[in-house]
């Protein structure tokens, strides 16, 4: 289709791009309209900008705290899952362990299960088991970082394993012959070559943690409440503040776009690394 009808190919991707980006554009349109205009006849084109919704969000101290919580929890979880996933994949790839394929499959089953299944066990673990005196992991940033590892760590292992398997073991052996220690082999041989896969894993786990709602809404109250769960506070019995919610949603998109922009050159390389072996 690309060679015979290039215009049809271009038209197809224009339509797909429009359908993909239009909801984001419409979200921005809602965020720059006053509440009165939202219930009038829909107007696709923006005729005037009403920035008060963004000003209200930025001036809200509680929402700023929610955003900081989201950044800390998402970044901490992404880094922790990427590091642990890399070492787990290195062990599965380089060491001849009995039942390692079963171990790999078992980790993936945690990702397959719906998050609602883990709500009660995680709540009891955070409030009863891992409790020291008056301190518990409930409604804490470190608690949410560890909770998200339940789902993001298996995903990180699944994503990174083809990357680590695609790095020839002969490089490790050559480094050992030259007198390198196991730690130097990992950090100076395998780690630099696995950088594209690590970048992809980091960004995907970060996005998953950033967008997660169910666990954050259940296991946090105020101290570790995230920005996505803060949206529900604007749905009340007296009405829904659509403009404020749209402005908050736009703010949630900005950090994700920045992170994607920083690592976009590694995404394609990371997704295809190890797909073809010589």
Image (cartoon, rainbow, N blue to C red):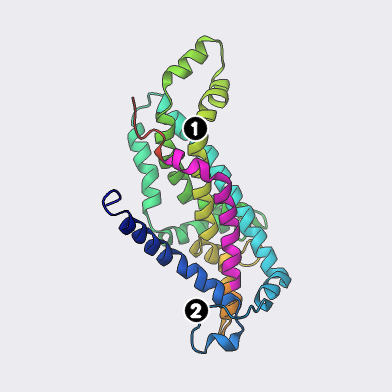
Residue 244 image position (x, y, % from top left): 61, 76
Left or right: 151 as drawn, with respect to 50: left
Q: Nearer the viewer, residue 159 or 37?
A: 37
Residue 119 versus residue 175 in the image, above or below? below
Q: Residue at x 66, y 73 (%)?
A: 54
| Residue at the spot of label 1 | 194
Q: Earlier in the sequence, mark 2 or mark 1?
A: 2
Residue 264 image position (x, y, % from top left): 52, 46
Residue 181 image position (x, y, % from top left): 56, 17
Residue 114 versus residue 249 in the image, above or below? above
Q: Residues within 10 Å of mark 2 (few under 14, many from 20)?
A: few
**SS of the residue at dot 1?**
loop
Mark 2 vs mark 1, foreground winner is 2
Q: Residue at x 56, y 78 (%)?
A: 46
| Residue at the spot of label 2 | 44
Q: Which residues are magenta?
A: 247-271
Q: Nearer the viewer, residue 158 or 265?
A: 265
Residue 149 shows up from this direction: no
Determine which quarter of the picture holds residue 188.
Answer: top right
């Amino acid at each position: 289709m690309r060679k015979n009808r290039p215009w049809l190919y271009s038209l197809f991707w224009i339509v797909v791009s429009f359908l993909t980006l239009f909801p984001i554009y419409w979200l921005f349109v809602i965020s720059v309209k006053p509440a009165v205009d939202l219930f009038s006849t829909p107007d696709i084109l923006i005729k005037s900008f009403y920035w008060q919704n963004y000003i209200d969000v930025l001036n809200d101290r509680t929402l700023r705290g929610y955003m900081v919580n989201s950044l800390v929890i998402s970044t901490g979880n992404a880094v922790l899952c990427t590091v642990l996933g890399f070492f787990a994949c290195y062990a599965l790839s380089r060491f001849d362990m009995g039942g390692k394929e079963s171990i790999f499959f078992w980790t993936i089953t945690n990702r397959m299960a719906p998050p609602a299944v883990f709500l009660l066990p995680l709540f009891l673990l955070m409030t009863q088991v891992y409790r020291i005196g008056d301190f518990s992991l409930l409604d804490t940033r470190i608690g949410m970082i560890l909770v998200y590892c339940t789902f993001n760590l298996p995903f990180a292992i699944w994503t990174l394993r083809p990357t680590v398997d695609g790095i020839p073991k002969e490089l490790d052996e050559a480094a050992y012959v030259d007198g390198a220690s196991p730690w130097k082999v990992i950090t100076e041989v395998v780690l630099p070559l696995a950088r594209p896969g690590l970048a992809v894993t980091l960004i995907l786990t970060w996005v998953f943690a950033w967008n997660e709602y169910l666990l954050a809404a259940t296991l946090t109250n105020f101290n570790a409440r995230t920005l996505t769960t803060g949206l529900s506070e604007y749905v009340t019995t007296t009405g829904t503040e659509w403009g404020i919610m749209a402005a908050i949603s736009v703010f949630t998109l900005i950090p994700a776009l920045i992170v994607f922009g920083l690592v976009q050159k590694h995404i394609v390389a990371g997704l295809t690394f190890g797909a073809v072996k010589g």
